[in-house]
Amino acid sequence: MAEGRDELKLLGMWTSPFVIRVKLALSFKGLSYENVEEEDLYYNKSELLLKSNPVHKMVPVLLHNGKPVCESLLIVQYIDEAFSTDGPSLLPAEPYECAMARFWATYIDDKLFASAFQASRAKTEEEKAEALKQTFTAVETLEAAFKECSKGKPFFGGDSMGYLDIVLGGHIPLVYVGEVRHGIKLFDGTRSPLLEAWMERFSALDAAKAILPEVDSLIEHSKAKQARAAAMDPTASN
Amino acid sequence: MAEGRDELKLLGMWTSPFVIRVKLALSFKGLSYENVEEEDLYYNKSELLLKSNPVHKMVPVLLHNGKPVCESLLIVQYIDEAFSTDGPSLLPAEPYECAMARFWATYIDDKLFASAFQASRAKTEEEKAEALKQTFTAVETLEAAFKECSKGKPFFGGDSMGYLDIVLGGHIPLVYVGEVRHGIKLFDGTRSPLLEAWMERFSALDAAKAILPEVDSLIEHSKAKQARAAAMDPTASN
């Protein structure tokens, strides 16, 4: 990035996997940016956020020289294309591999983590069991996809990490939180040995360690949020 | 496309806006392909479809030399990238414009047409009114997006049509059907004069006329489907 020419500002919230994903992309590309933390996404969104993402009013938003890009998967692709000469390429160069990467990225968000989220919020044991069933089916599907994409190498991107590593990498902190808070071990040595090993490998990368928030802090935050919700609505759980 | 080297096969269903979208992309790129119509997507999906799209089991699927690409928005991007030297480019070359095109493409499917579909299937007047309110808010938002993307020119893509034109273009036949069958005029001169004019302009293009199915045939198909559903479940309505 030509410093002084390009100004990058990230509107985010430190606990969001979608924001973490964008931070990972910026980190791996070696791009510096100003981090702007939203104070209260539930009741008091900032004017800058509402102006920058009037359609969805959600984080993350990346402002590049003042121009907003929204939706984390699109932001990561944008970073890769707009800063093609900075750091490694994230998306595969080959069109078919690129289409596969985009396909699995959407799958990770819309199937795997949507089901896991439902399981963590289930109100009955039956609901939880059904959501977990869908979650683990998705894990097995993704395990097979990892095998296909990585071709026996350490990352989705092959020898070095790429787009899908970043997409899934943003969820890692919440995978650990889910294990502690909800007893859901998403990746394990029996069902998904490749993904379990991938998660350890990814978390150990310097560019990832610099970004991934502490699991203990996330757990504290999650507990505090639950306590606030319970105080406002005594019938609410989790 | 180097004939004899590349084999393209499209698994689809002629009434689907997502399949029409892919056909439009192939048409505008001047690519020839074998069209494989699914006979019964509800009760008897083909072995080829189940094998080619085991995750979602949905059309369209584009098989390129036997390798499947799924999800219509990804297929159109794939066609553009894999056949970059055939016909016009569909996605904008400039990364920011490209990010915007991807953003609005998802908006068209997930907000605009998801709401319009809900309105067409509403069981009560209240449900229909609420879905229509969301639909027309989305139309107004897209009208503003058209103004921004087209910069006063005839298409989302500027002087000639591009990715977003194709994405929205696939929905045109059902826009006409929705007007006749459900009394929902999606684009009109008051709320969305730019989109209304765009729809007429797009429909008149030779490459579009060659692809867009006859509205009368779609209406017949829609009525027959409703009659079959009513015969199987007398309480069902459309």
Image (cartoon, coloured by chain):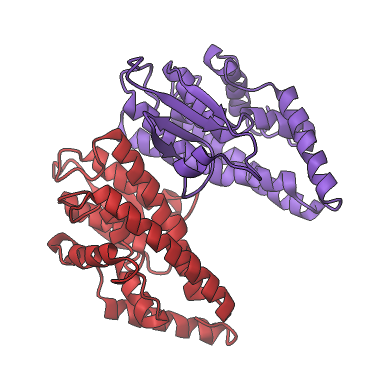
Chain colours: A red, B purple
Residue A31 visible to the viewer: no
Residue A7, given in percent of the width and then of the height, sits at 22, 46
Residue B165, given in percent of the width and then of the height, sits at 50, 27
**Residue A92, above or below A32:** above
Q: Residue at x 79, y 34 (%)?
A: B224
Residue A84, given in percent of the width and then of the height, sits at 20, 38
**Residue B219, above or below A76:** above
Residue B12 visible to the viewer: yes
**Residue B71, above or below A207:** above
Q: Nearer the viewer, residue A49 or A181?
A: A181
Residue B93 shown left or right of residue B187 in the figure: left
**Residue A95, above or below A208:** above
Q: Residue at x 45, y 54 (%)?
A: A50
Q: Residue furthest front?
A: B47
Count of picture labels: 0
Q: Quadrant of residue A18?
A: bottom left
Q: Nearer the viewer, residue A65 or B16?
A: B16
Q: Residue furthest top?
A: B206
Q: Residue at x 71, y 24 (%)?
A: B215
Q: Residue at x 36, y 52 (%)?
A: A72
Q: Nearer the viewer, residue A36 or A169?
A: A169
Q: Quadrant of residue A221?
A: bottom left
Residue B87, given in percent of the width and then of the height, sits at 38, 16
